Image (tube, rainbow, N blue to C red):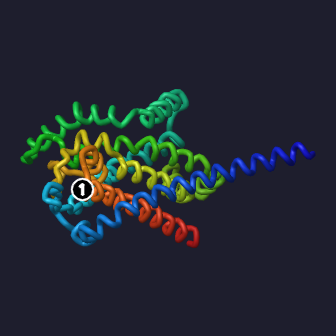
Amino acid sequence: MKRKALTERVMQVIFFVAACASVLAVALICIFLFANGIPAMKEIGFVKFLTGTLWRPKNEIFGIFPMIVGSLYVTAGAIIIGVPIGILTAVFMAYYCPERIYKPLKAATELLAGIPSVIYGFFGLVVIVPLVREFGRNMGFHGNGNSILTASILLGMMILPTIIGLTESSLRAVPEQYYEGAVALGATHERSIFRVVIPAAKSGVIAALVLGIGRAIGETMAVIMVAGNQARMPEGIFRGVRTLTANIVIEMGYAAGLHREALIATGVVLFVFILLLNFSVALLKRRSEHE
């Protein structure tokens, strides 16, 4: 008994240290970002930094509003493309997919999650960019294919495995009695799924959407390769754009002084975006639970 109690005590200490390490890592990241980013914002001016439309480091003009808008546009496009496809694919895999093709389809979706970002970027550069360029020119728009639309399509593909995996798990976690009860009351197969099962799995679906949005807004390498990277206000879905993450990666290698601090401040803005997203989703989940 003493040995068992000692083992349990040791494991409790190990778990506590692991939890503290996670909290410490988050705290250190926050301290680094805010300690280096906030002074730069003060020196540049909060309003000028957040709402300025010009980014000219050589002239010490730092306005990240075009990058904020670009990140929002690209993320919104990825959500519009990826979320419906991901949820419908999860529904198919959970309730419609024949057994003989389930395993290959499941393996394919899991493989998507393991593909490096740079490979996605190469695929977008070689395949999606020419298609978007040709499509845009047929529609009467100018551009070389490196655009908001291209980045949105690519990011929509990249968030699919996250949304599909979590949504399918949430759907399968709903008790069978929910579906059976709806069918017994006269609902069709589709109505039972979309009106009963999916609302019952709402918390898991929302978690999948949050992780997908976080992946989209935080993606860097693939976006750099297909988005065009022009630090200017977006002029249409067929024109180039620069995101917050791309702005940091492109210029951090040679930045110094106020320029470097401004890039760290850009990271602060991105970090705050993620916090606001998580906070909003937490409020939404709490409201739905009370309802």
Kindly identify the amino acid type of the residue bearing the numbered disc 1: His
Expressed as whole percent of the image width and height from the top left, the position of residue 160 reads: 41, 43
Please state, as top left, top right, bottom left or bottom right, where the N terminus lies in the image. top right
Q: Residue at x 49, y 28 (%)?
A: 104
The single residue placed furthest to the right in the displayed view is 1
- Few, some or many C-alpha atoms within 10 Å of disc 1 (few <14, some 14-19, many ≥20)? many
Nearest the eye: 136 or 28: 28
Q: Is residue 65 above or below residue 126?
A: below
Residue found 25% across the figure and 52% down from its top: 256
Q: Quadrant of residue 73?
A: bottom left
* Residue 55 as seen in the image, left or right of residue 267: left
Q: Is residue 187 left or right of residue 251?
A: right
Compared across the picture, whether 224 is left or right of 94 comes to left
Residue 121, percent from left and from top: 29, 36
Q: How many marks?
A: 1
Q: Residue at x 13, y 38 (%)?
A: 134
Residue under label 1: 259
- Is 138 on the left-hand or right-hand side of 256? left
| Snapshot quadrant of residue 32 | bottom left
Badge 1 element: helix
- Find residue 29 and report its horizontal and vertical position in percent: 46, 55
Residue 79 seen anywhere in this rendered image of the structure: yes
210 or 100: nearer the viewer: 210
User: Taking the image as drawn, is residue 152 in sight?
Assistant: no
Q: Is residue 94 above or below residue 26?
A: above
Residue situated in front as seen by the camera: 43 or 63: 43
Please name whichever residue, 175 or 237, is drawn nearer the observer in this view of the structure.
Answer: 237
Which of the image's four quarters has the C terminus? bottom right
Residue 200 at x, y percent in the picture: 57, 58
Residue at x 15%, y 49% (from the top left corner): 239
